[in-house]
Amino acid sequence: MISTKSWVPSKTLLPDIVHGARKEILCLRSSGTRCLKYVSCHSSSNKSTPQASLVICSSSIDGRTGLSWGSFCQDPSFRRNTVGQTFCSVGSWTYDGAALENPSHVMEEKVGVLLLNLGGPETLNDVQPFLFNLFADPDIIRLPRLFRFLQRPLAKLISVLRAPKSKEGYAAIGGGSPLREITDKQAHALKTALETKGLSANIYVGMRYWYPFTEEAVQQIKRDRITRLVVLPLYPQFSISTTGSSIRVLQHMFREDAYLSKLPVSIINSWYQREGYIKAMADLIEKELQSFSEPEEVMIFFSAHGVPVSYVEDAGDPYRDQMEDCIFLIMQELKAREINNQHTLAYQSRVGPVQWLKPYTDEVLVELGQEGVRSLLAVPVSFVSEHIETLEEIDMEYKHLALESGIKNWGRVPALGVTSSFITDLADAVIEALPSATAMYPSTGPSEVVDHDPFQYLIKIFSGSILAFILLLSSKMVMAVRDLVL
Ligand SMILES: C=CC1=C(C)c2cc3[nH]c(cc4nc(cc5[nH]c(cc1n2)c(C)c5CCC(=O)O)C(CCC(=O)O)=C4C)c(C)c3C=C
Ligand SMILES: [Fe+2]
């Protein structure tokens, strides 16, 4: 809900905003009929987002009064509002003068922010069912359409076979994933950061493969009667396998539900290029470099979670491009601080028999050791929380491998977690995204979009069964499962 802090005469405010002064102006009111009150106004001081400054105001224009919500912008491509200021309004309600005397009549926005994340097993007993959920996701194991009905049996098989190895990893980091706890802390910090900026919002955490599931979060959003939602995946770069998968779940739920299909939603697909995030990453790297005796000699080693090459080359996943762009931006920021270390990017955590994005982290570490690199700073770059791949794979397996390969001095940058500059930037991202929220399915009713042709379904099952039989017999399949597990 909108918060009201103080009131100042509008005349002093309007020119400031219209001329783009980047001031933090909270609340104000006008006299007369022109603008009755501004509920909350913010002007972002972040230079990377020059067009964005959220303004929520109610104003009286030509005898009618409206509550508008949007961004003042300097970009001329945005349309002008009725009082001629550069204002991109995304929502407005009109109400009569009587309502103004009684503010309880004014419709209130109830803003929600849905944080999307992967989720992780909290105990060792959760590992196999968690893996099942992961491998049952058609965005993780991408079977041809006809074989989709095999997804769940295959997921069951792979999860059971992989569970012992995964359990070892989770046991080594204390018996479970820290992801839920860290994401809850991030949610709490984001709520506080938004409140500081004058926006009161409910924050929801929706995990893809473990509790609290995205589906539960969405049910809560419905119960809370949220009127405007920002979806913020906690993955800086977009991948079909992460953000894409979670958004697919949302699309499915929103399409089928009368309330959700009309709910104004703004999805932030990726945010790796935000100045606040890039600076926060550069801060962490700069700080960690100082722990080496010769900081300028250190190789900055970006290690990103990989995806199969086919995602990028066949399915058009922008993940690799975004990752490379992200590294470029971080290095540019470091150069601006006169930090000119060498750097490299490699991909970790590959699973299964197919080719993943190269170069592979384990292979590069060995090569660097052989080439004579003596100091190395590992930077996990695809995720903003500590998790099994940082705490076990990087801190244990890769560190061991690096030291064995001749690297003498090893360091690792912590994940961003609740670093305040990072959380503040996420809050800005949410505020900037709010005005562009639109209904996902404004005109389609739930029944119009669901494909329930029983004949087609039977044909699919029949032809799929035959092909599946052939596939299951093929030795390639057996090898694929074996490789996936080991
Ligand atoms: C940007 C981040 C991630 C991408 C891309 C990604 C793709 C991806 N992952 C798997 C398989 C597994 N991932 C597992 C854990 C895991 N994955 C990510 C992030 C990305 N995955 C995180 C943060 C975590 C850890 C969660 C936690 O518990 O802390 C696992 C389970 C662990 C294990 O057994 O190794 C698997 C399996 C695939 C196949 C894939 C792309 C297709
Ligand atoms: Fe993963």
Image (cartoon, grey):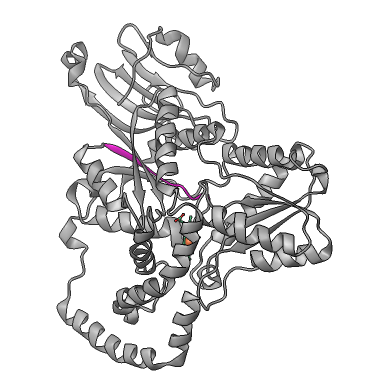
In the image, residue 170 sits, relative to residue 196, either above or below, namely: below
Query: Residue 240, image x and y in percent?
Result: 45, 62
In the image, residue 404 sits, relative to residue 18, either above or below, namely: below
Does the image show residue 455? Answer: yes
**347 or 37: which is nearer to us?**
347
**372 or 146: which is nearer to us?**
372
Q: Please report the bounds of the magenta region as a residue range.
A: 227-236
**19 or 46: which is nearer to us?**
46
In the image, residue 239 sits, relative to residue 186, either above or below, namely: below
What residue do we see at 82% from left, 48% from top? 297
What residue do we see at 53% from left, 53% from top? 237
Query: Residue 254, image x and y in percent?
Result: 26, 52
Residue 73: say if magenta.
no
Residue 235: say if magenta.
yes
Q: Quadrant of residue 93?
A: top left
Query: Residue 428, image x and y in percent?
Result: 48, 33
* Dominant secondary structure, magenta: strand
What residue do we see at 39% from left, 77% from top? 143
**262 or 348: which is nearer to us?**
348
